[in-house]
Image (cartoon, rainbow, N blue to C red):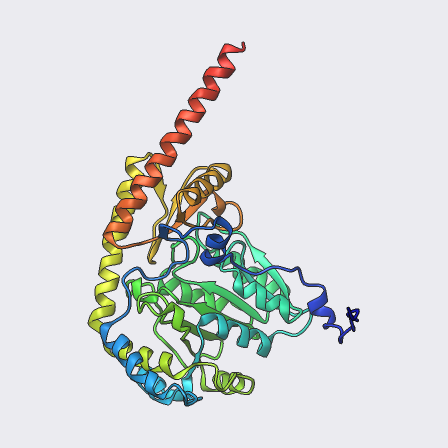
C-alpha cells in the first residue's frame, strides 16, 4: 500500500488561528443526530410555527422553473416593494441572506483589528462571532432588570470609542423592549463615529410605539429586518437593511453579489405583498404568548414580558433552567437558554401552534413534577440520616 504523504497547506491568518473552535448555536439537527431520534417539538430556534404565506409558497414554486438562472444581484423588485412599504428610496435598502449575512457584511466593512464593538452581555451571539472574525474586540454591557441597559451601552461606546453598537429591539433572548422615544434618546448619546445596528428581527410582532420612525438621513443607524420570523421563511435565508444611501453604497463594495437566490427573492416579494397573512401570524403569536403566561402561572413560574414570537420563562436559577432544558430534551422537546447570567435563569420557548403549545405544557408539567418528586425524596433521605 502506498504511504499517504501529508503536505502542509498555507497557514490561516493570525486572527483566525487564535479564534476558539466554536459556533454561535448548536442546531436542532445536530441534537437529533446526537440523540439518534427526531425531536417531538422544535421550540428553541424562534422559527415560525405558522408556516409561510400561501402566495409566497406559490411564487417560490413558480420560480423553481428558473432556478438554473442566477438571482438578480440587486434584488431590484424586492427593494422597490420594500421602498414603497417603508417610504424610502431603493438606494436606502440592502438585501442579504438573512440578518446574519448582513451582520457579517457590516463587521467586515467597519471593524479592523483591535477596533471595539459594544453589545449586551448575553445578547444575540452571532454579532460577536463576526466581530471576532475581523479581529475586533467586544465590550459587553450587562442587562439591567432583564432589559438592554441603554444608558450603560452608550457610556461604554463613548468610553471605548466603539465603531459599532449592536442592539436588538425587541430583544433576543429576553423578548423585552424599549420604546421609540428611549431609542431616539439613545442614538443621540452615542459618539459621532459609532454606527448603531438596530436589529429589528421581531418588528412584525411589535406595537408601533416600539419602532422609531425610519430616518434614512441619519447615517448613525442601520435598521436590520428579516423574513425569517413572522413571514415564516427562515430556511430561505433572506433579510434586509435600511440605512443612509452612503452607508448602503459602502456595504455594496464588498457585498456578495449573488448571495440571495432567486427563489428566496420571489417568496419574500410575494410575502411582503400578503400583509393580511403576516398580521394573522402576529395575532396568533399574541394568543400563544398568553397561553405560555397562563402555563407559567399554573406552574408557579413567571414570564418576562415579550414583544416577540417567543417567551422567556424564569426558572429561578441557572441550575434549574439547565436541568429543565436537559430534561425537556430527553423528552424530545428542544428549547434554548440565554448564554449569560442573569438571563440564564430562564428557558426561551418559541410560540408554537395550539397543538404544540398544549404538548409543551404537558411535558413541562411532567418534568417539573418529576423534579419536585426527586427533591422531596432527597429531603426525606437527608432527614432520615440525621
- Residue 161 rendering spot, x and y as whole percentages: 62, 68
Q: Nearer the viewer, residue 145 or 344?
A: 344
- Residue 72 rendering spot, x and y as whole percentages: 41, 89
Q: Residue at x 40, y 69 (%)?
A: 235
Image vertical order of residue 296 relative to residue 352, above or below? above
* Left or right, residue 282 beside residue 107: left
The N terminus lies in quadrant = bottom right
Image vertical order of residue 375 relative to residue 133, above or below? above
Residue 297 lies in quadrant: top left
The C terminus lies in quadrant = top right
Res 83 visible:
no
Residue 53 lies in quadrant: bottom left
Image vertical order of residue 123 relative to residue 75, above or below? above
- Residue 236 rendering spot, x and y as whole percentages: 39, 73
Q: Residue at x 49, y 76 (%)?
A: 220
Res 325 visible:
yes
Which residue extends farthest front? 1
* Left or right, residue 232 beside residue 104: left
Q: Nearer the viewer, residue 57 or 100?
A: 57
Q: Nearer the viewer, residue 134 or 137?
A: 134
- Residue 101 rendering spot, x and y as whole percentages: 49, 74
**Number of numbered callouts drawn:** 0
Amino acid at each position: 500500500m502506498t504511504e499517504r504523504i501529508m503536505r502542509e497547506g498555507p497557514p490561516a491568518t493570525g486572527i483566525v488561528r487564535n479564534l476558539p473552535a466554536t459556533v454561535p448555536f448548536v442546531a436542532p439537527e445536530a441534537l437529533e443526530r446526537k440523540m439518534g431520534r427526531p425531536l417531538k417539538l422544535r421550540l428553541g430556534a424562534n422559527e415560525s410555527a405558522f408556516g409561510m404565506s400561501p402566495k409566497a409558497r406559490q411564487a417560490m414554486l413558480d420560480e423553481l422553473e428558473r432556478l438554473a438562472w442566477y438571482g438578480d444581484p440587486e434584488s431590484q423588485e424586492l427593494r422597490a416593494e420594500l421602498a414603497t412599504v417603508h417610504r424610502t428610496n431603493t438606494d436606502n435598502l440592502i438585501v442579504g441572506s438573512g440578518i446574519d449575512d448582513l451582520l457579517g457584511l457590516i463587521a467586515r466593512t467597519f471593524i479592523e483589528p483591535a477596533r471595539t464593538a459594544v453589545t449586551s452581555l448575553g445578547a444575540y451571539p452571532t454579532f460577536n462571532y463576526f466581530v471576532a472574525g475581523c479581529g475586533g474586540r467586544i465590550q459587553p454591557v450587562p442587562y439591567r432588570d432583564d432589559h438592554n441597559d441603554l444608558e450603560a451601552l452608550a457610556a461604554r461606546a463613548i468610553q471605548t470609542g466603539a465603531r459599532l453598537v449592536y442592539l436588538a429591539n425587541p430583544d433576543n433572548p429576553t423578548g423585552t423592549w424599549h420604546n421609540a422615544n428611549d431609542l431616539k434618546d439613545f442614538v443621540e448619546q452615542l459618539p459621532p463615529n459609532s454606527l448603531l445596528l438596530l436589529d429589528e428581527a421581531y418588528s412584525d410582532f411589535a406595537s408601533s410605539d416600539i419602532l422609531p420612525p425610519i430616518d434614512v438621513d441619519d447615517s448613525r443607524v442601520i435598521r436590520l429586518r428579516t423574513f425569517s420570523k413572522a413571514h415564516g421563511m427562515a430556511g430561505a435565508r433572506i433579510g434586509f437593511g435600511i440605512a443612509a444611501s452612503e452607508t448602503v453604497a459602502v456595504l455594496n463594495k464588498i457585498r456578495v453579489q449573488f448571495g440571495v437566490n432567486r427563489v428566496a427573492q420571489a417568496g419574500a416579494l410575494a410575502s411582503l405583498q400578503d400583509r393580511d397573512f403576516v398580521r394573522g401570524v402576529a395575532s396568533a403569536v399574541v394568543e400563544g404568548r398568553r397561553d405560555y403566561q397562563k402555563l407559567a402561572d399554573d406552574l408557579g413560574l413567571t414570564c418576562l414580558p415579550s414583544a416577540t414570537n417567543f417567551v422567556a420563562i424564569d426558572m429561578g436559577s441557572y441550575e434549574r433552567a439547565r436541568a429543565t432544558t436537559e430534561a425537556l430534551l430527553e423528552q424530545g422537546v428542544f428549547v434554548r437558554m440565554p448564554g449569560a447570567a442573569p438571563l440564564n435563569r430562564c428557558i426561551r420557548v418559541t410560540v408554537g401552534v395550539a397543538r404544540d403549545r398544549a404538548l409543551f405544557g404537558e411535558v413541562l408539567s411532567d418534568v417539573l413534577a418529576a423534579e419536585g418528586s426527586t427533591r422531596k425524596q432527597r429531603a426525606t433521605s437527608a432527614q432520615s440520616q440525621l
